[in-house]
Amino acid sequence: MRLIRSSAVLTAIVLATAGCSGGEASTSGPSEQTASPAAASSTVTGRPSPQPNREPPARPVAKEQQRLNEQLIAASWKNDLRGARALIARGADVNAKDNTVQSAYLISTSEGYLELLNLTLRHGADVDSKDSFNGTGLIRAADRGHANIAGRLVQADIKINHINNLGWTALHEAIILGDGSGRYVDTVRVLVAAGADLRLPSQRDQITPLQHATSKGHNDIAQVLRAALEADTPSKRADRRLLAAAERGDATAAALAIRTGANIEARDERGRTPLLLAVTEDKLAVARLLVYLGANPDALDDQHDTAWLVTGVTGSVDMVDVLLPAEPDLTIWNRFGGTSLIPASERGHVTYVRRVVRTDIDVNHVNDLGWTALLEAVILGDGSKRYQQIVTILLDADADASIADRQGVTALQHAERKGQREVARILRNA
């Protein structure tokens, strides 16, 4: 009799567990067609098995969801990407708001956390979500001068001209609450390029963006707005104007060309995009604008150069920092089969090499000539202090000094043959 009672209790436990997990015994699959031992015991005794507890699991599930959401919001304030990813994987909602109307998504926009923003967008962030001021993420980003965030949100098709409960759009916010510095100029250019309404006044005082900029002494922003107001009509030559603006480094003209219909991936006769032209001429403001708006850093021209590859020739560390958030493909080779690190090592770009070895670039890649960056620094370098520094940096980054060229000559042997005594000493001590 004790065995029968134990079986009945076991039945209750099993069925209760199935109910809590959302399963239904009558529709669970083929196994239900065979009576379970517990069910057989119930038949033998002639008494029904105890009914499982079928209270809906909403309360514990809701509490767990709330806890995950609160933890995600806390992680977002700290820009804890690893923690945020783990919490989202467990079911945290990137759109869930706390009692101050903050969500992981909204926090990323105001705090300028681009990677966090991308994470939330990949997991269903609602770009139309509003904060306690009825403001969008774009307005929050404009308030802080986060031009890169503004550009990313523009790519996500956020509403450019939404008005918050202060009567301001993102453009108003960038001007009224901004300090007129470079990051706000960049933000205004992004908004202008994206089609912001330049004539819409702030609702409470009916003052236009240009009037706000002028009254606050934001002269650079006022100049951008005046130029935009004068050229605010579609143009059939917009692509050509964008390419020309990129090459000469006129970021305002580039923004206006995009506003009036230019293709951000337009090509010149050599297959160069506006971004590639800007990088080649080291025009940072234009490159920033184009990257913020989603320009492709991997577009190849007719010489098999990309924007990233060109940085190895120019040696511009500032441009490296502009391009890296666009996640360029560091494995694309130039026409000589090399990465950007190889020409940089050849040309003695010390600061560039120091910066780029911190990325995932392959320091031991061998080009079509059979040379690594280390071999190139020795064979084509002059052994001076800057090449000594490059050799040291490469070795510290795990460059393999034993890799020989096609004739079997190592970097050390080349250094000895060329009389580069200090470089040879560094290589011997590696």
Image (spheres, rainbow, N blue to C red):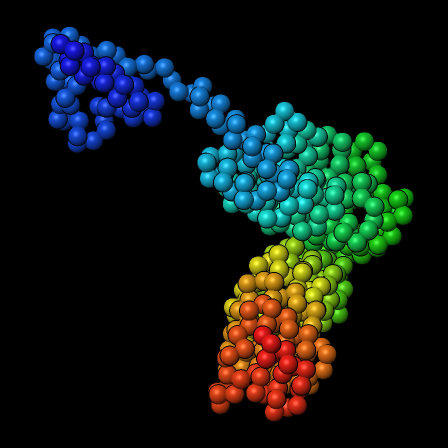
Q: Is residue 11 above or below residue 340?
A: above
Q: In which quarter of the view is residue 290 placed?
A: bottom right
**Left or right of residue 66, residue 20 in this image:** left
Horizontal side of 416 relative to 207 (left or right) equals left
Q: Can you tell which quarter of the image residue 264 is in? A: bottom right
Q: Position of residue 7 (x, y in %)?
A: 18, 16
Residue at 58% from the left image edge and 84% from the top image edge:
412
Q: Position of residue 8 (x, y in %)?
A: 20, 14
Q: Quadrant of the C terminus?
A: bottom right
Between residues 196 and 143, which one lies in front from this camera angle? Answer: 143
Furthest residue toward top? 47
Tell me the residue at 66%/90% (across/down): 419
The answer to whether one can see residue 5 in this image is: yes
Q: Is residue 151 above or below residue 331?
A: above
The correct choice, above or below, for 135 with respect to 410 in the image is above
Asked whether residue 261 appears in the rendered view, the answer is no
User: Residue 248 sits in which quadrant?
Assistant: bottom right
Q: How many marks?
A: 0
* Residue at left offset 71%, top offset 63%: 318
User: Picture coordinates of residue 343 (x, y %)?
Assistant: 62, 77
